[in-house]
Amino acid sequence: MSRKPRVRTKTYTLKDTETAPSRPWTDLIGFEGVDETLYRLWHENRLPQVVVIEGRSGIGKRKFMAKLAARFFCETHTACGNCDACQSVEQGYQNDLFWLETEGSIKVAEAEGLQDFLGYQASKSPRLAMIIDIESMNDQASNRLLKLLEEPPPAVLIFASCSRFEKLLPTIRSRSVRWRVHPPLIEQSMAFIKGQLADPCPDLEIENTLKMFGLSIGRSLAHLEQGSPEQKAKLDRLQKLLLLPMKGDHLKELQDLLKEQAWKAPDLAQFFEVALNQSYRRILQSSRSTSLADFRRIKHWRKILQQVYQAGAVGQNNLNVQLVAEALLSPFEG
């Protein structure tokens, strides 16, 4: 069987504007059957042309998007990973696929490139566009694509991934269909991470790390592989500080640790929630009697956490991490 000329898909990255990055999906875990379902809906003419895949950061959405694209072009439509069509997706020379991924925000130039690409006549049906982390698209780029999203050309499918659908412009949300995906089962994630680590690691540490990073396999693996004992000790200290009544020295130490982490407010809230759950379990398992103040303190913290999550859900994405920390540490009525 003759191979097609290897004309690389035009892919924008800040590292390399000529060569598409490799996009393997063979080690993808979770997402069972989702790509098959989306392909079947398309085959039955029931799939909308613009679909946003929403799921937590770091759970493997990029790999899933590659597998989804491969299913459309695969010679057996199974994303086998072995045929030339699958290789064309993985290595970036599939002519009917536009893979838009940047290290920073997606700007107007990238949006124009996508618009030009989708304006060409497809050599076969369908022509796909994959937009990675569409919430990183700035307002100018989003506005540039509105007409395209409202009336995509025939035989075109646009898939985008995001972590927070609510962060997208209302006009983008109204022109797309949201498809939620969930993190793999924690047992699957733990088994995968154990297989990737060069050195053995206790199951409890892997489980706590996954919870600390919101079930993000990528961030958890990076922390377990590269996190120095000093960094791990700092996170442990930060976790303890968040559960202490604040005093002057403690507050200064907390501020310094938060600056080092360079977290966004939702990251801090997730980290604090894990610390709170672990603290609650320790209270229940301890031999000392549990005071009413313990439960009032936990109730107070959970109320603040709920407010943080609600604020993020309605688009207040510029929440200041220091203000969130201060809210979590604010006095409660004992």
Image (cartoon, rainbow, N blue to C red):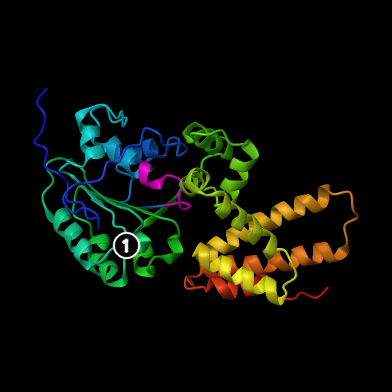
Q: Which residue is mark 1?
A: 104
x%, y% of residue 150?
27, 62
Residue at horizontal 74 percent and vertical 68 percent from the top:
300
155 or 162: nearer the eye? 162
Residue at the right extreme of this rendering: 289
Quick check: can you spot residue 210?
Answer: yes
Bounds of the magenta segment: 54-63
Residue at the top extreme of this rendering: 1
72 or 307: nearer the eye? 307
Dot 1: within a 10 Å radius of its alpha carbon, few (fewer than 14), some, or many (20 or more) residues? few
Residue at horizontal 47 percent and vertical 34 percent from the top:
196
Quarter of image, res 90: top left
- Dot 1 falls on a residue whose secondary structure is loop
Which three-letter amino acid code belongs to the residue tagged 1?
Answer: Gly
Check residue 58 for magenta coloring. yes
In this rendering, position of residue 105 left or right of residue 268: left
Residue at horizontal 17 percent and vertical 59 percent from the top:
113
Q: Quadrant of the C terminus?
A: bottom right
